[in-house]
């Protein structure tokens, strides 16, 4: 996936599904059994590669634990995303060929547990390259944008408060969306593959983490005040939504 100026991507479609940020982040939430509210790993500043490979799915796939047809299924992966209908786009971690010549891709998957991966068939899918990468530093409370391995922009952010921390790890942008003006969290949102390690939502929300605006929510940039999502100024999230597409890697860490 090359920069949008090359591919001619359009901005994400408007949603008519009620409050999308409520569905994604889960404003009404229940604690996960055994989860520690203060748990968060520490890590040095990650190294960002100039490019990453992603795969666009053109058919539903069964993600397996190993690259052969007899392996146990990890997840059923649809070809399009549930909120926006965007093409499912997943980061590629490895490639393999089985004994019968079948080609396989190891991909990062959305959902619980965080860090889930699986092997999908190479057929009926298209490989692309993305030069974008997002780093979110929970200690400095900043989102940093990289292009071609070089730091391009940096935005102050609101991150998860101590009782509902933003999870750390390697994730990706699952869906992109423009929020209706009456919905909280606008004007734009990037729904991530990450899920809260502390909270499980009900009433339609999976406890999914998103990067979104502060419309109707507030929060002081540079503070830890959210349920786990990352909030940006309207100008910052609008800029991101212009360029960042599904499949872009997102690394969340505590510097």
Image (cartoon, grey):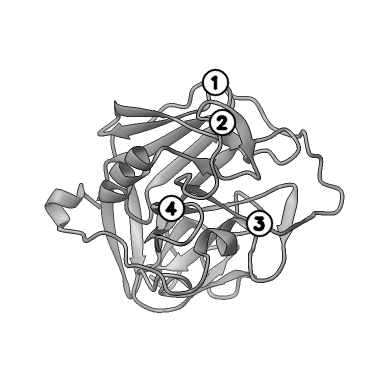
User: Residue 44, which numbered label?
Assistant: 1
Task: Please name which of the two marks, 2 or 1, marks the residue nearer to the observer.
Answer: 2
CB contact under 8 Å: marks 3 and 2:
no
- Looking at the rendered structure, the secondary structure element under dot 2 is strand
Q: Give the percent coordinates (x, y) of residue 249.
A: 41, 45
How many residues crowd mark 1 within 10 Å: few (<14), some (14–19), many (20+)?
few
Task: Please name which of the two marks, 3 or 2, marks the residue nearer to the observer.
Answer: 3
Task: Please name which of the two marks, 1 or 3, marks the residue nearer to the observer.
Answer: 3
Q: Is residue 81 above or below residue 116?
A: below
Q: Earlier in the sequence, mark 2 or mark 1?
A: 1
Q: Marks 1/4: CA distance?
A: 31 Å
- Looking at the rendered structure, the secondary structure element under dot 3 is loop
Q: Is residue 153 above or below residue 21?
A: above
Q: Marks 2/1: CA distance?
A: 8 Å
Q: Nearer the viewer, residue 136 or 226?
A: 226
Can you identify the residue that label 2 sits on? 253
Name the quadrant containing residue 201. Answer: bottom right
Residue plotted at (60% across, 59% down): 111
Can you identify the residue that label 3 sits on? 27
Q: Earlier in the sequence, mark 1 or mark 4?
A: 1
Q: Is residue 149 above or below residue 197?
A: above
Task: Please name which of the two marks, 2 or 4, marks the residue nearer to the observer.
Answer: 4
CB contact under 8 Å: marks 3 and 4:
no
């Amino acid at each position: 996936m090359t920069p949008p100026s090359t591919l001619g991507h359009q901005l994400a479609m408007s949603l008519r599904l009620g409050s999308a940020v409520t569905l994604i982040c889960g404003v009404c939430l229940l604690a996960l059994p055994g989860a520690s509210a203060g748990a968060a790993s520490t890590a040095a500043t990650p190294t960002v590669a100039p490019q990453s490979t992603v795969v666009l799915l053109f058919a539903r796939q069964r993600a397996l634990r190993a690259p052969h047809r007899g392996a146990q299924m990890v997840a059923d992966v649809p070809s399009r995303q549930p909120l926006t209908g965007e093409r499912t786009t997943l980061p590629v971690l490895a490639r393999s060929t089985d004994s019968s010549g079948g080609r396989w891709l190891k991909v990062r998957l959305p959902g619980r547990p965080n860090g889930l991966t699986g092997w999908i068939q190479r057929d009926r899918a298209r490989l692309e390259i993305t030069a974008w990468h997002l780093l979110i530093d929970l200690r400095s409370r900043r989102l940093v944008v990289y292009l071609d391995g070089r730091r391009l922009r940096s935005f102050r952010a609101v991150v998860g408060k101590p009782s509902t921390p933003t999870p750390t790890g390697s994730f990706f942008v699952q869906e992109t969306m423009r929020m209706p003006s009456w919905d909280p969290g606008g004007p734009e949102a990037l729904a991530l593959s990450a899920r809260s390690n502390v909270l499980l939502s009900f009433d339609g929300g999976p406890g999914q983490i998103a990067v979104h605006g502060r419309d109707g929510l507030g929060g002081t940039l540079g503070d830890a005040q959210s349920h786990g999502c990352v909030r940006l100024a309207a100008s910052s999230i609008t800029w991101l939504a212009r360029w960042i597409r599904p499949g872009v890697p997102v690394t969340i860490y505590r510097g």
